[in-house]
Image: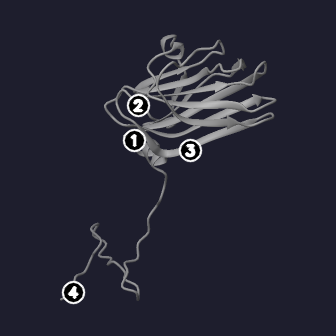
Amino acid sequence: MSTTIQDGTGSKRKVRVNEGNRLLVDSITEERAVFNSVEDGNTFIVSTDFLSFTGVTGQEDGVIYIKNTSSKKMLVHHIKLWSGTAGQLTKITTYRNPTLGTLISSAIDADIENINFGSSNEYDGLGYQGDGTNLKVTDGSVWGRHYLGIGNQQMLVMMWNGAVVLGRGNSLAVTCEAPNGVTVNLTCEIEVYFE
């Protein structure tokens, strides 16, 4: 007895099978963040203004902080940092679940935009930025250390494609330590989506 798989739209087309007994199908593959933005309108960019930090040895300056206040999961697609000037390497540190420090308590709102321009969905979390005046992160656990390169127009991309998940109440912060006596210009963006 044979089974026929037929198109359910009424066209009476049947599924094709090749000589290796495999169904012939087409599919579209796209990143989850793209699918989420197009279909649900729940993908956002959290970004800082153009910031300047003058380095003091051993002093970290808060760059950006995000926190999930939603009942949905917040998935981090990527963090990008751009540097306009630097004569030496700038240290970049990421923190898991920080809750204290002037970066958080001084609450300078970061820019937050839905990347689906036709969506009216709003970001369901917190997003704060530094201001170059040594705003601190004083707790949380270090979970990443990076260097931002030497020279003009350096970029650091930490790409996770949604593998970093912030549940309700979880947070993430990025700090920088500019070289001693050197002023470093930075801007940062974090792309997140909710599911």
Give the mark nearer the N terminus: 4 vs 3: 4
Pointers 2 and 3 in contact (C-beta within 8 Å): no
Q: Amino acid at mark 1?
A: Asp
Q: Is residue 158 above or below residue 123?
A: below
CA gap between label 4 and label 2 equals 49 Å
Q: Position of residue 40 (x, y in %)?
A: 39, 41
Under mark 2, the amino acid is Asn
Q: Which residue is mark 3?
A: 159
Residue at 80% over, 33% down? 152
- The residue under label 4 is 2
> How dense is the environment of label 4, judged by Cα within 10 Å: few (below 14), some, or many (20 and up)?
few
- 73 horizontally vs 104: left or right: left
In the rendered structure, which disc, 4 or 2, sits on the residue that comes first in sequence?
A: 4
Give x and y (percent) for residue 140. 46, 25
Front position in the image: 131 or 123: 131
| Coordinates of residue 165 in the picture (x, y in percent) | 41, 39
| Labels 2 and 3: the sequence-earlier one | 2
Q: CA distance from mark 1 to mark 3?
A: 22 Å
Amino acid beneath label 4: Ser
Name the element at disc 1: helix
Q: Earlier in the sequence, mark 1 or mark 2?
A: 1
* Disc 1 and disc 3 in contact, CB within 8 angstroms: no
Q: Nearer the viewer, residue 132 or 139?
A: 139
CA distance separating discs 1 and 2: 9 Å
**Upstream in the sequence, badge 1 or badge 3?**
1
In the picture as drawn, the residue positioned furthest to the left comes out as: 1
Q: Earlier in the sequence, mark 1 or mark 4?
A: 4
